[in-house]
């Protein structure tokens, strides 16, 4: 049931490229009572944003590095927003680049992985991960699409790994969740990813035909479990 206008909450999504949005999670957030507002981080006046005002902040993915402020100056301003949100202890979810920004804001290193991890594959959950919201994934495959990796921040829990990337997820308290992978990618719109990242796929020798087929294969299962993960995370927060 959708919340009434008087009871709705606010969700601010920091977006870096237009097609990497909330994807299949957008309808779920709406059902949970959130009004969604996107801010395009490369174009916005980030210094004018009150990042503590929304009930939830989601920092989305993108094809740049969390350490690229010398090339893209807005990254420094976005990092400051993420740090302010984390320091306040208010709910924040980071996906891919968003998780890397969270890790860096918490004092952890973010650096090139050395290879591109691109494609659908399941996670291996740590002991902490098995009692976390990620347990709702079961053996479902998620979309990996990154070439950088974060270290787990001091005081945070390491939740998941893969054979390629040791650090795939972390949690800090109940309010902060960082995911290196994509729960939200919509297979019905995967073509935008394949076109938008065509140069990266070519350089990494990733076959877009195979990746498209993977997206179709895993879409239904991932669309079911992704809201379950986020639901468990939201439900664990203090009222």
Image (cartoon, helix red, strand yellow):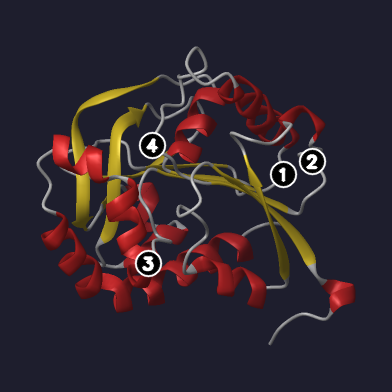
According to the image, label 1 marks what residue?
A: 90
Q: CA distance from mark 2 to mark 3?
A: 31 Å
Q: CA distance from mark 2 to mark 1?
A: 7 Å
Q: CA distance from mark 4 to mark 1?
A: 26 Å
Q: CA distance from mark 1 to mark 3?
A: 31 Å
* Of pointers 4 and 1, the one earlier in the residue sequence: 4
Residue lying furthest bottom in this view? 1
Residue lying furthest right in this view? 6
Q: Residue at x 55, y 60 (%)?
A: 233
Query: In this rendering, is residue 229 above or below 155?
Result: below
Number of residues whose C-alpha sits closer than 10 Å to that of mark 2, classed few (under 14), some (14–19) or many (20 or more): some
Element class at badge 3: helix
* Of pointers 2 and 1, the one earlier in the residue sequence: 2
* Of pointers 4 and 3, the one earlier in the residue sequence: 4
Element class at badge 2: loop
Q: Residue at x 23, y 39 (%)?
A: 199
Residue 66 in percent (x, y) is at: 46, 26
Q: Residue at x 52, y 17 (%)?
A: 69
Contact, mark 4 vs mark 1 (Cβ under 8 Å)? no
Q: Residue at x 20, y 36 (%)?
A: 116
According to the image, label 4 marks what residue?
A: 63
Number of residues whose C-alpha sits closer than 10 Å to that of mark 1, classed few (under 14), some (14–19) or many (20 or more): some
Q: CA distance from mark 4 to mark 2?
A: 26 Å
Closer-to-camera residue (119/238): 119
Disc ID at residue 189? 3
Q: Which is in the foreground here, disc 4 or disc 1?
A: 4
Query: In this rendering, is residue 78 above or below 92?
Result: above
Q: Which is in the foreground here, disc 1 or disc 3?
A: 3
Query: In this rendering, is residue 222 above or below 209?
Result: below
Q: CA distance from mark 4 to mark 3?
A: 17 Å
């Amino acid at each position: 049931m959708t919340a009434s206008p008087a009871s709705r909450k606010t969700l601010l999504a920091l977006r870096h490229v237009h097609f990497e949005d909330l994807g299949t999670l957008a309808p779920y957030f709406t059902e949970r009572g959130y009004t969604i507002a996107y801010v395009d981080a490369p174009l916005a006046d980030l210094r004018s944003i009150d990042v503590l005002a929304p009930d939830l902040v989601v920092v989305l993915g993108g094809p740049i590095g969390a350490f690229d402020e010398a090339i893209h100056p807005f990254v420094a301003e976005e990092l400051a927003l993420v740090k302010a949100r984390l320091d306040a202890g208010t709910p924040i979810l980071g996906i891919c680049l968003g998780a890397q920004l969270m890790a860096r804001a918490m004092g952890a290193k973010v650096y090139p992985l050395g290879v591109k991890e691109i494609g659908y594959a399941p996670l291996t959950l740590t002991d902490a991960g098995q009692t976390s919201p990620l347990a709702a994934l079961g053996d479902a495959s998620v979309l990996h699409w990154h070439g950088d990796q974060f270290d787990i921040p001091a005081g945070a829990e390491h939740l998941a790994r893969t054979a390629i990337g040791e650090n795939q997820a972390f949690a800090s308290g109940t309010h902060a969740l960082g995911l290196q992978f994509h729960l939200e990618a919509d297979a019905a719109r995967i073509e935008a990813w394949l076109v938008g990242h065509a140069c990266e796929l070519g350089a990494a020798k990733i076959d877009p035909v195979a990746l498209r087929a993977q997206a179709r294969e895993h879409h239904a299962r991932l669309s079911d479990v992704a809201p379950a993960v986020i639901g468990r995370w939201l439900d664990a927060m203090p009222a």
